[in-house]
Amino acid sequence: MATLYSNELKAVVVMENFLENPLNVMKENCMTVQHFNYECEHKRNEAGEIYGAINPVMLEFTVRVNSPRQARAFYKELVSNEHSNYSFLFNVTYNENQRLNTYEDGMVVNGYIVHIEENYTTAAQQDGSNTQIELSVKLLSRSVTYLGADNNYKSIFIQ
């Protein structure tokens, strides 16, 4: 098996909390992430203790959706003013039933969608479809749960 480097990781996003039902994630509910970026910064004193306010953690990601139905779910979250869970999983594989089989690592982000931009592609795609929508989403993070091999680590930003 080839070694994967960070800029070669394949990521998918699922609009739910992966930890609630990890064995029942369908491939059709996973959207491929084209771009992923966030910065999380804590201030620490000389003793290593966190102090002061942290900057808001904005997570930005871009996905390609194949139908307005998939895009509608993001817009519903944008206008709801409610926080939701978004699971980002890296290097996933699926079993013969098109359910999630394995993943390398991931994170569950709870937050608010604060901005969406759309770009349309109408040229014929390799899979035979004609239209794809690229959504660039900005998410204000309340908390992030990092999924590890042995345990999970949760960082809370907004109470």
Image (spheres, grey):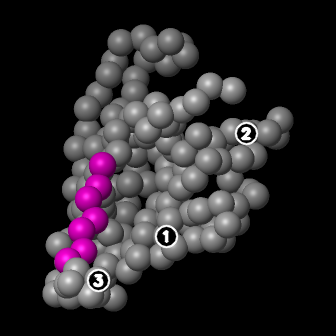
Magenta residues?
37-43
Query: Is 101 located above or below residue 146 in the figure?
Result: above
Helix, strand or loop status at disc 3: loop
The residue located at (26%, 87%) in the rendering is: 47
Mark 1 vs mark 2, foreground winner is 1
Is 66 in the magenta? Answer: no
What residue sits right under mark 2 in the picture?
94
Can residue 26 be seen here? The reply is no
First of labels 2, 3 by sequence position: 3
Residue 87 in the image, given as x and y percentages of width and height: 51, 58
Residue 88 in the image, given as x and y percentages of width and height: 50, 53
Residue 144 in the image, given as x and y percentages of width and height: 43, 69
The residue located at (47%, 45%) in the rendering is: 70
Mark 1 vs mark 3, foreground winner is 3
Helix, strand or loop status at disc 2: strand
What is the crowding at mark 1: few (fewer than 14 residues within 10 Å), some, or many (at least 20)?
some
Residue 145 shows which numbered tag?
Answer: 1
First of labels 1, 2 by sequence position: 2
Can residue 36 be seen here? The reply is yes
Helix, strand or loop status at disc 1: strand
The type of residue carrying mark 1 is Thr
| CA distance separating discs 1 and 3 | 22 Å
The image quadrant that residue 24 belongs to is bottom right
The residue located at (73%, 39%) in the rendering is: 94
| CA distance separating discs 1 and 2 | 23 Å
What residue sits right under mark 3 in the picture?
48
The type of residue carrying mark 3 is Gly
The type of residue carrying mark 2 is Tyr
| CA distance separating discs 2 and 3 | 42 Å
The image quadrant that residue 64 belongs to is top left
Magenta stretch: helix, strand or loop mostly:
loop
Residue 109 in the image, given as x and y percentages of width and height: 43, 66
